[in-house]
Image: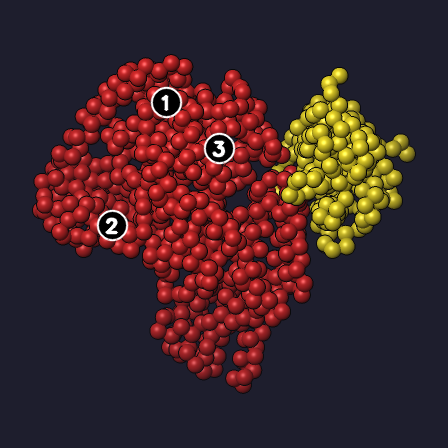
């Protein structure tokens, strides 16, 4: 393939001029950006946007309103960023915006010039009035590479991406040889962000060297870990970055066709990619002879129908081929024989997003962030019992402690930290003692978890670790394809043992049985779903064996979570005679007043629904959970 | 003929064709390796039964013999503590999920499970793990074939042979523990497009698909 250097750059130059021309007028009027990724929408972003539009019309204010993606501060959604070019104020980001706040922002700020700082989260630029995001602990730790423009540009408009320097890397790539690009990727040390951390450059080199007329690129956006939403947010906020990375990857390995394998459960992401691909084609950045370089490449969108195992690359390929999504034995690896038997590169969304940055700024720049073995940043979806949930991009090597206490602002509700679950169903639960572990592929493996694709669920004192292990194993057992013996039957046996333990039917020796089964399942399973399925059980046994022992030997759940091992009890000394909130809340009429008008729970009738505990006014807090359930009888006896 | 490859299995020097899998090279030389799902003609092995583990010199852990291609000078060992443990666990897991009624089973004495138990000194009745019974209905609707899903070990041989030589009506359905060999929408064989060619019963290693006796 022959490139004409002049043509490539001049074609992109023309496009960029167009893009800037459409971007510039946006900055002349007040600009309101509403974070409307799935997280924002769930919190009411579309209603907020509607209110803003109505208010602007009512007050006859001329302003641009943009629907943007997510900046990662999901806890404070809906987020609104307002820029008033004619004022002294910098662009201000407002959090927890309701329809009422939205109409006040329009009236007071855009109408009368009062920026309503009581609702402001932070400023977007350094200034003298308002702290910026970088002034908070989270801002100090975060380093945004691939999320740089997430939440700041309109994902539905390619011109926004072009105006931020988008597709420049592609342009420079088309003037290089595939070999030099692969070399840059190898030099950068980028490791696949799907979970396994395989060096991306090495994978590309294998595919480049594979002798075949046809090759394929697949973007794996089949994110399925419970509690993880990194890929969704990135695709909803800046789909063009992934597409640019994909085109570069295609050029580097010589593929003419690419697939984006995205979950059908992500309708907004699917819509955004579809629109983005359409726009890229219109700008001749995709299709026949991209930017007149003679390089052909096109992308097709394939919606996965919700099987977790389809995130495994051989199952994913089978799924695109129209076969059931079931893993095959590797080798051959897809880079040698993948889709339709042709060499295929499968990269995670985040991996592809790094590519344009590495090409533009070089391998050394990329290596300057992170650790020597795991360069770059890590993106985590912080969920669970932390104060500030959301998406955070931090350099590799950041400790778990910093993630939870600085980025996530600690544990919500004044509770104490118990564990952090990293890596989803293939990962593990880590306790406080290893919180100083740096986040990178190798360190996490050493302590019994995995990097995974970026799910990080924080658990507090109310979470039972046996129940958490059971939950994850139940997930993998249901999502196992059932093909191989160890995964289909082995995880079922493990799940049965765990279910018995959480129901108080555990027997001495169960832990040893779990450990033996886990070891065999890891060694015997066909694919990585099975090989990693026992990890949540192994890590909870390793760090929280005392909880297993309490369940098995004392039939007691220390976290008061396992329904079969707890009973609800009303403390007579705390119960208020004149109050009967709990009586009304009980759906099965299990609560009655005794002769002293103290409320008592009939344990036979109680269904342990938690209603009375929630109904009991906070000044009394008379309803408590006791474990083991026999504790209730013991206390009642003691009273008499 | 292409160049023959020489390798050793359990110290015995054997020759094989390039591209052959270790499992078939061993079986051709009367060296037994437990297996259920492997089909020699199928060049993309299912590798689903996970019983044909062997040690290969230079490999960090046991591998399945059905997926390993023979290499010159390869040194294969069919027994080792690690291999025996994996085979024992895998076999035990399968036996917790296989209805054991050998005395009335048409596959009695020809059953691959009995052979594995005999060759490796394993018990047909699970010792460590409890039974995981499925209690699925037996399909005896077809004139010549009986299908008892409770005995099925999900090796997939019937699915492959039905697809390549039969009417192509058998397939896998559902996920995880509920995965089973069945027809489209779980129709009884008589109501499916089954042509009663019996090839499935011919390849079933365990007596889940059997030919009806004329009694």
The disc placed on residue A109 is: none
Q: Mark 2 points at which residue?
A: A133
Q: Is residue A213 above or below residue B109?
A: above
State the SS at label 3: helix
The residue at 41%/45% (across/down) is: A372
Residue farthest to the bottom, as pictured: A640
The residue at 11%/50% (across/down) is: A114
State the SS at label 2: helix
Chain-order first, disc 2 or disc 3: 2
Name the subunit of mark 2.
A
Chain identifier matching the yellow colour in the rendered picture: B
Chain identifier matching the red colour in the rendered picture: A
Residue farthest to the right, as pictured: B215
Q: Name the residue under label 1.
A: A176
Q: How far from the left and from the top, in percent, is residue A155? A: 30, 33
State the SS at label 1: loop
Task: Report, in whole angstroms, how far the alpha carbon at label 2 lies from the one at label 3.
Answer: 37 Å
Q: Can residue B146 be seen in this view?
A: no
Q: Name the residue under label 3.
A: A202
Where, by quadrant of the figure, is residue A514 drawn? Answer: bottom right
Q: How far from the left and from the top, in percent, is residue B29? A: 82, 31
């Amino acid at each position: 393939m022959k490139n004409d250097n002049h043509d490539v750059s001049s074609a992109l130059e023309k496009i960029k001029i167009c893009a800037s021309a459409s971007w510039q007028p946006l900055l002349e009027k007040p600009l309101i950006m509403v974070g409307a990724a799935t997280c924002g929408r769930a919190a009411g972003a579309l209603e907020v946007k509607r209110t803003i539009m109505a208010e602007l019309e009512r007050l006859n204010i001329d302003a641009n309103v943009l629907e943007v993606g997510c900046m990662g501060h999901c806890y404070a959604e809906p987020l609104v960023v307002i820029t008033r070019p004619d004022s002294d104020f910098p662009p201000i980001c407002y959090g927890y915006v309701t329809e009422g706040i939205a109409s006040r922002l329009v009236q007071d700020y855009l109408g009368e010039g009062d920026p309503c700082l009581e609702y402001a989260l932070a400023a977007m630029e350094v200034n003298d009035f308002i702290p910026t995001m970088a002034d908070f602990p989270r801002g100090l730790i975060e380093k945004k590479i691939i999320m740089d423009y997430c939440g700041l540009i309109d994902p539905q408009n390619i011109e926004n991406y072009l105006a931020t320097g988008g597709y420049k890397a592609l342009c420079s790539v088309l003037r290089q040889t595939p070999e030099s690009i692969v070399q840059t990727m190898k030099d950068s040390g980028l490791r696949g962000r799907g979970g396994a951390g395989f060096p991306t450059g090495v994978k590309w080199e294998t595919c480049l060297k594979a002798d075949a007329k046809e090759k394929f690129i697949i973007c794996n956006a089949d994110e399925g870990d419970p509690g993880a939403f990194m890929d969704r947010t990135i695709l909803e906020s800046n789909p063009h970055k992934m597409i640019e990375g994909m085109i570069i990857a295609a050029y580097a390995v010589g593929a003419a066709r690419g697939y984006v394998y995205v979950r059908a459960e992500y309708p907004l992401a699917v819509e955004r990619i579809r629109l983005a691909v359409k726009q890229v084609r219109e700008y001749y950045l995709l299709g026949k002879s991209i930017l007149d370089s003679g390089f052909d490449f096109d992308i097709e969108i394939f919606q996965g129908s919700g099987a977790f195992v389809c995130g495994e690359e051989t199952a994913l390929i089978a799924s695109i081929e129209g076969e059931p999504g079931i893993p095959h034995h590797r080798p051959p690896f897809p880079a040698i024989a993948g889709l339709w038997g042709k060499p295929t590169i499968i990269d995670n969304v985040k991996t592809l997003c790094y590519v344009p940055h590495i090409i533009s700024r070089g391998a050394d720049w990329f290596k300057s962030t992170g650790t020597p073995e795991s360069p770059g940043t890590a993106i985590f979806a912080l969920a669970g019992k932390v104060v500030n949930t959301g998406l955070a991009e931090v350099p590799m090597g950041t400790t778990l402690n910093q993630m939870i206490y600085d980025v996530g602002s600690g544990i919500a509700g004044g509770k104490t930290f118990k564990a952090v679950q990293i890596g989803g169903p293939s990962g593990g639960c880590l306790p406080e003692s290893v919180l100083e572990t740096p986040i990178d592929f190798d360190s996490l493996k050493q302590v019994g978890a995995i990097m995974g694709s970026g799910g990080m669920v924080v658990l507090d004192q109310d979470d039972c670790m046996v129940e958490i292990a059971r939950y994850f194993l139940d997930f993998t057992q249901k999502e196992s394809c059932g093909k191989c013996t160890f995964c289909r039957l082995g995880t079922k046996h493990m799940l049965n043992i765990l279910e018995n333990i959480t129901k108080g039917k555990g027997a001495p020796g169960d832990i040893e049985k779990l450990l033996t089964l886990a070891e065999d399942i890891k060694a015997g399973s066909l694919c990585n779903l099975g090989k990693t399925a026992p990890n949540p059980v192994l890590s909870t046994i390793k760090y929280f064996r005392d909880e297993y022992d309490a369940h098995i030997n004392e039939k007691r759940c220390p976290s008061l979570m396992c329904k079969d091992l707890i009973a609800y009890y009303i403390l007579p000394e705390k119960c208020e005679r004149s109050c009967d909130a709990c009586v009304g809340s009980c759906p099965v009429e299990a609560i009655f007043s005794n002769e002293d008008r103290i409320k008592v729970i009939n344990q036979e009738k109680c269904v342990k629904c938690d209603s009375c505990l929630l109904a009991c006014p906070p000044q009394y807090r008379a309803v408590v959970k006791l474990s083991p359930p026999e504790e209730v009888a013991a206390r009642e006896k003691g009273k008499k | 003929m292409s160049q023959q490859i020489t390798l050793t299995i359990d110290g015995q020097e054997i020759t094989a064709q390039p591209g052959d899998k270790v499992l078939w090279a061993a079986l051709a030389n009367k060296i037994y390796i437990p297996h259920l799902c492997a089909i020699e003609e199928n060049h993309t092995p299912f590798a689903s039964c996970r019983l044909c583990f062997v040690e290969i010199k230079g490999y960090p852990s046991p591998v399945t013999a059905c997926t390993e291609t023979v290499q010159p000078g390869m040194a294969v060992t069919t027994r080792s503590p690690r291999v025996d443990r994996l085979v024992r666990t895998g076999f035990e897991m399968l036996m917790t999920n296989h209805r054991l009624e050998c005395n009335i089973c048409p596959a009695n004495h020809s059953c691959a499970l009995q052979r594995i138990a005999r060759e490796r000194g394993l018990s047909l009745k699970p010792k460590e793990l409890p039974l995981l019974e499925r209690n699925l209905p037996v399909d005896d609707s077809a004139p010549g074939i009986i299908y008892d899903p409770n005995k099925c070990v999900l090796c997939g041989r019937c699915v492959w042979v039905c697809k390549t030589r039969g009417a192509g009506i058998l397939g896998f359905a559902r996920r995880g523990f509920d995965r089973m060999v069945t027809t489209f929408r779980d129709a009884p064989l008589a109501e499916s497009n089954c042509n009663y060619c019996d090839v499935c019963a011919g390849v079933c290693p365990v007596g889940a698909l059997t030919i009806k006796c004329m009694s």
